Amino acid sequence: MGQYVVRRLLQTLGMLLLLSILLFALVNLAPGGPLAGYGQSRHILPDRAEILKRQFGLDKPLTVQYLIWLVGNDWMRVDANGDGIIDGYGTRRGILRGDFGFSFRTRQPVLVEIRQRLWNTIYLMSVTLLVALGIAIPIGIISAARQYSLFDIVVTTFSFAGQAVPDFWLGLILILIFYGWLINPFTGEPLLPSGGMYSLESQLVVLDRIKHLILPVTTGALGWIAWYSRFMRSSMLDVIHQDYLRTARAKGANQRIVLFHHALRNALIPLVTLFALDLPYIFGGSVFIETIFAWPGMGRLYYQAATQRDYPLLIAILIIGAGLMILSNLLADLLYAYLDPRIRYS
Amino acid sequence: MSRKTLLRGLIMVCLLGILVFTLTSCQTAEKTEQTQSPQPVITDTKAPSPSSITILIAEDPPSFNAMISDTGYDALVMELAMLGLTDIDPQGNIIPELAAELPSQENGGVILDEENGTMSVTWKMRNDVHWADGKPVTADDVIFTWNAIKNPDTGSWIPGIESIDSVDKVDDYSFTVQYNTIYPGYLMQFGGEQLVIWPAHYCNADQGFAAWDCGRKPLSDGPYILEDWEAGDHMTFVRNPTYYQAPKPNIDQVIVRTVPDASVRKTMIIKGDADVIMWTTEPIVHDLENEANVKISFSPQNRWVMRLFFNTAAKGTVDSAATPHPILSDVRVRQAIRLAIDVDTISKNIWFGYSKPVWTEFFRYPYACDIPRTLYDPQAATKLLEEAGWTDQNGDGVRECHGCKSAEEGYPMEMELITYSEYGEPLVLTQQLIGEMLGKVGMKLTLTVVEGSVLWADSASGGIEQTGNFDIDLYDDGYGGVDPTDFIWSYYSADAATPDYGWNVGRWMNEDFNSLLNEAYTLDEAHRKEVFCQMAKILDQEVPMLLMFSTINAEAYSARLEGVQSTVNDLVTWNVADWKIK
Amino acid sequence: MCSASMNQTPIPTPQEALRSSPVALLPSNPGRAAMIWRRFRKHPGAIAGLLVLCLLILAVVLVDFSPYDGNASNMNELLLPPSWQHPMGTDALGRDLLTRVLLGGRVSLTVGLIVVVISLGIGVSVGALAGFSSGRVDGFLMRITDMFLSLPSFMVLILISAILREVEAPFFEKNNILTIGLVIGLLGWMTFARLVRAVFLILREMDYITASRCLGASGLTIVTSHILPNAIGPIIVESTLELGYAIIEESGLSFLGFGIQPPTPSWGNLLSSAQDHFIAYPWLAIFPGLMIFLTIISVNYIGDGLRDAFDPYKVLTKVGNV
């Protein structure tokens, strides 16, 4: 097991490195590279571009730029004010030390921008994922236990439908219905809020938060419920028909115990690893849901940064997102290897 | 692996979920930014709950410094918290804010040196304005702001920056601006829509004007203080008890909320969840006009004129003399395009009738010039094109050059019409209609939509306008205030055609126009008007830019609010201190 | 967007697969196609899906016969609700929405096809190479695949699209559809690679392959006559799912303004134009969304039916590929 872990860790490091090179090269493909978008305002000082280039170290060869991006330049002497003369030490610490640069739009450090929104996305996506799993797993189990029953057929149809609905469309329709048309019979106000995380004047904090969560969570969870319930059902079915369960039943074990203790445990194994693969979405969020429901999160931040060509922010989010994905993969592989001894020795 | 381990794992996940949920309910202000200024405390428990209004915007402001980012959202919140020397009202009248009075030649504030062509302006400031931390607003703050602006590394361009030699302190509440030329726009030098005065004792000069922290955590001298900013979601402002126009502002609390989706914003104001929608667009105004609890404030003047910019240099080049555009360098083609576009149809069907036809830059008080309007006449357009040597001889519906003066024989009349995406659907539809209309007179246009950040970037970044990488460019622009001189210079002067130096991206060069423009830098109003109208005639004849119609400048606001007045010269919060709840 | 795990289901190990009955893994024989079709027919959902998809493709191909021009404006018929003359109503420029939706379908389906072709091409090559080679090459290719899999694909699509729109390359502008298809395909081949590799790994251990090798068959013969025919099943199944994935990604991109640009209609950008008015004129948003929904659901049902038809005992697609 230990050897396997070490091997996988080394491979992970290699992938992260390759990934960083790939993303860095991608961003520098754009003309003007990282400076594109710096002159947002329609008022630009002449000769500014040259100065900026030198300040950002863009006149150096790409490999040097990559190195500086990775480990910073405060250990080397650079041209700090862009006048062509090397006059001091750099100020960047590199991404390995947490310095992802400054956003073009707000001039704030990129990590600060991310930190301000990250929690909101984690909050929304965790709730969405938990709700999705909480509904999908029981549905999947019941569906498998009562295969071909009416319940099963309805669930299967629903899961196909649920995966086919585009979430940007669904979000708009839900707002139309629950905010535009339906009225709360007690207060005369719209049934559900149109967006945002919480009302600023509300007294009942938890209830208010729940109200604000309902529509975005429904929109986001639908696809996942459809997918996970189907997967759960199929996984359970595979396990139910397996030989060792037949043995357990033959030995006289109670039907329900057989189902829930043996089958479920084994059916959940692949689910757990799939879930680990979905974890990065908790950090990335969904652009559509956050835009339509005015949720200040990472997805919307990314989209805004893309329209405004705020490259430092874009790259930081991608690196963090991809890095998390790679780490989740590692986690999933290790988990799977731990849970299923057959894998370890392959 | 045992059953216990799996169950334990599942329980942990559930617990985590509950934890996440409760934590978020408890923490509300942990991640928001706090200001350092004193918070007003309402200690009287019997006092009525504070009056509060909500303003909706489409995007989170990047900072409070509207000079740097110029998105409009920054100017909106800047007007809530900070003051400039002067401001400008919806009619175009300049009003003093931090200034005690407006300097002029009559009161000796403005001294002209005719011989050398220079002037100096001495400002007297009010002595009763304080920052929210108690310190007075003085000339030191002005000097500080000026030094930060003109810093070559961390400063920024402002209108007039090339014309100023120095800004010198006279005493605590007055200073003198020494110009190296006659600069007619001197009254708005340190005020207006984008520029305010920043506190010397609070902002960090080392960080620089372009990036200082006080741009995100401002110290207020205006009617409101920033209490809370949850990035991407909302900003909460509370009244500034030390505001110099006490007892104003009338409203205790202003919340600025970011809601990106336009139809959601509209629904919110109908339901009463919001009080003002900043920059309400034509389709929304059209939908809201019949709502009982929503009123619309239209700006008395028009500013944003939708226009087609013709590139007189070949696409991808920046020198119209060396490499003229094969199609658009011929003035007859440009005039034909003007004849071929039915502005009224576009205006009625896409802009819901809210737009007004505009055909000259000089259509506003006090420089409205009498230029006759060229009406829609596709037959005349066809005739003009044929005269200019563009005919369709191969029957494919697209003209080619046969005897034209700017291109080689057989060159097809195909061009690209570009516009920007941020405006929204009406602009995209307008682009499509224009493409169709020009198609009817034999021009084939490919339509492209790009982001503004790509269109307006500098030439090193591949900015489409600055690198001349376009044929025809469709967008809206116009000048704020009463003085068009800077605007005209940046769009039509020969100097402004140099990449990154100005915005004459059509690279139009006209000597007569340039000399007339130089004459406009005078304080003699009668002469200015004369000069402007002569320039208007040249523009009408040469059509370097085709002006079509003005777009709306309006704000929708809830009927319980009074005092909201939309303006083209500033953002709607320009007079927020005067707003009242009925 | 789609769940990450939807594209990364764990592939069974050779041992797992071998433990089950290899009935489906017979060497190719002529009666096989008929057998597969017979099994497919038993799925009502799949048949319905096939019908809907065929109808859609037919409509999309025949849209040129529509009496309306999908691009010409008509000022007299702005924003009309659905009627006999205009079954889906008209849009903000008076254009018949049904025509535009079908034209959009043409674009979306074309992009989908391009994506499938590209990701098949890359994925099958990578997977076959990895599966057929040993150790080092296999490991290296799999790490590359994993790396691509770890990229949050939708976000990277936005980034690439943003960069492409700044680069001054006439190819990208004139061939918007091809470019979008290429870009989405470049990020969608990984599932094919893993699938093909898994099939190769399973099959190459089979006795009849070993027998062929002993009899002197070359590597190429083995691949083409024995392995590929058996791999075709899962590949076809995955292709249909890939089509669904491509259409959703393209719609999402176009909705955000990073995909197909107006005035060329695509289901995504039709939805995006509808946003301003959709409460007042809901048909503008309902129909394009409905088309996406119908296409994806049909494609999913077809995929499901194909999966059962090719592999009723779920040998090659066990544990995960539902």
Image (cartoon, rainbow, N blue to C red):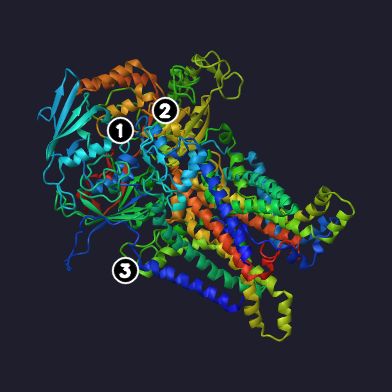
Q: Secondary structure at mark 1?
A: loop
Quarter holding residue C22: bottom right
* Image quarter of the C terminus of chain C: bottom right
- Residue B30 in the image, given as x and y percentages of width and height: 34, 62
Q: CA distance from mark 3 to mark 1?
A: 46 Å
Kindly identify which residue carries mark 1.
B479
Q: Amino acid at mark 2?
A: Phe
Q: Alpha-carbon neighbours of circle 2 within 10 Å: few (<14), some, or many (≥20)? A: many
Q: CA distance from mark 1 to mark 2?
A: 16 Å
Q: Alpha-carbon neighbours of circle 3 within 10 Å: few (<14), some, or many (≥20)? A: few
- Depth check, front residue: B92 or A261: A261
Residue C83, visible in the rendered structure: no
Image disc number at residue C94: none
- Residue A273 in the image, given as x and y percentages of width and height: 60, 65
Q: Amino acid at mark 1?
A: Tyr
Q: Amino acid at mark 3?
A: Gln
Q: Secondary structure at mark 3?
A: loop
At x 23%, y 59%, the residue is B51
Kindly identify which residue carries mark 2.
B309
Quarter holding residue C104: top right
Residue A337, visible in the rendered structure: yes
